[in-house]
Image: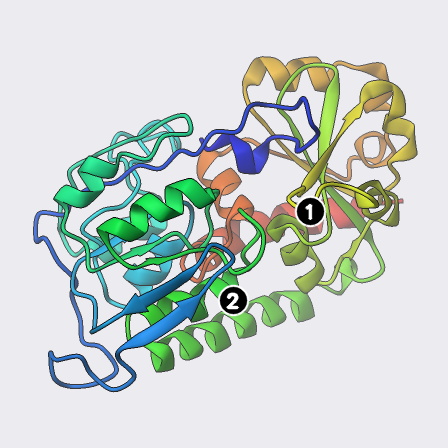
Amino acid sequence: MRYPRWAASAAAAVAAVLAVGLAATACGGGTGSPDHADGSAGPGFPVRIRSALGTAAIPATPKRVVTIGWGSQDVALALGVVPVGMQDFTGDTGDTTGVLPWDQARLGGAKPVQIKATGTEVPYERVAALRPDVILAVNSGVTDAQYAKLSKIAPTVGYPGKPWMTSWEDQTRLVGRALGRTGRAAGLITTTKARIAKEAKRHPEFRGKTVAFGSGTEPGSVNFYYDADARVELLRQLGFTPAPSVSRLGAGGSRNSFAKQVSMEKLPGVRADVLVAWYLSPSVRTAVEGSPLFRKLRPVRDGAYVPLTDPGLVYATSAPSVLSLPWMMDRYVPKLSAAAGRAG
């Protein structure tokens, strides 16, 4: 699994890792039709898309798409485009296909060639070999230097604000614009928001409950995600209130911070009705949950604690998208409902 998004953002926290894996599909190009009928540049092209890293000038409707980071492959597939390069998730979701569960059906039988990158390196030669028309790094940790190199290969759409902090709505809009499918993207956003609103209405027990989302990446501490993080924002959209005690942890933090590492000794200062958390490994989970200070947390004591153990569910909640959100709802919401019902 990709660690930088999940690890704490404190200065000496887990080393940043950009897990950018690319896979070439057997068909070697996009599928489906853009919002216009012909295969030329199409209405709206050329298009210029600004990001925090630079401006992507896309001359015509892209036919060969590469995605970097999290979620852009979900949006492309939801819009009917099969990327020629997308991340290999082998081992991350408990299967050997390298494709996330909600993406599998959208490949239309294509068998991507699995290409995985680890650490902070982007496999530029592999990306270039795919001859992309556009590179989508809309929710990623691509650096200025990496962006410059990628932009020499093809127009590259970066993140609009902070690295790893692009909302699912913004990601859908940007990918839709880059692929010439703005109308379809808008429709996906409307449908997905309606699904979230429906769940919120069905679960009034969420309203008035404060919630914290944490992770265990090393023994002896818990990382808590700030309000702007996608995990917490989704819980807010479902009706929960982000715990003020966690919100205050972000005051004065780094502009690129999305979480705060809290030692066990300071855990009593984190107060919430419901706690959700994922763990880097079973051994880390055992160590964290074995701490008397962790067990004294009110949601843990009351049974209002939701440990996420399914790798697919961890991914889906960490990087919500128009494809992962529908997949997660039937699995995630019942757990949240049970926890909210036990909250004191």
Asked whether 338 or 122 is in front, the reply is: 122
**Depth order, front residue of 243/194:** 243
Using residue 81 as the reference point, say whether residue 250 is left or right of it: right
Q: What residue would you read off at disc 1?
A: 255
Other-residue count near label 2 (Cα within 10 Å), few / some / many at <14 / 14–19 / ≥20: some
On screen, residue 319 versus residue 218, left or right, reads left
Q: Going by the image, does 131 lie left or right of 183?
A: left
Give the quadrant of residue 157. Answer: bottom left
Q: Which mark is residue 57?
A: none
Helix, strand or loop at disc 2?
Answer: helix
The residue that appears at 47% across and 75% down in the rendered structure is 191
Residue type at mark 1?
Answer: Arg
Dot 1: element: loop
Which residue appears at 49% of the width and 34% of the height? 310
The image quadrant of residue 181 is bottom left
> Is 8 rendered above or below residue 166?
above
Image quarter hosting the N terminus: top left
Above or below: residue 90 compared with residue 106:
above
Q: CA distance from mark 1 to mark 2?
A: 21 Å
Image quarter where the C terminus lies is: top right
Tag 2 residue: 169
Q: Are marks 1 and 2 in contact (CB under 8 Å)?
A: no
Identify the residue at horizontal 21%, vertical 73% (top origin): 61
Q: Is residue 142 visible?
A: no
**Three-letter amino acid code of the residue under disc 2:** Glu
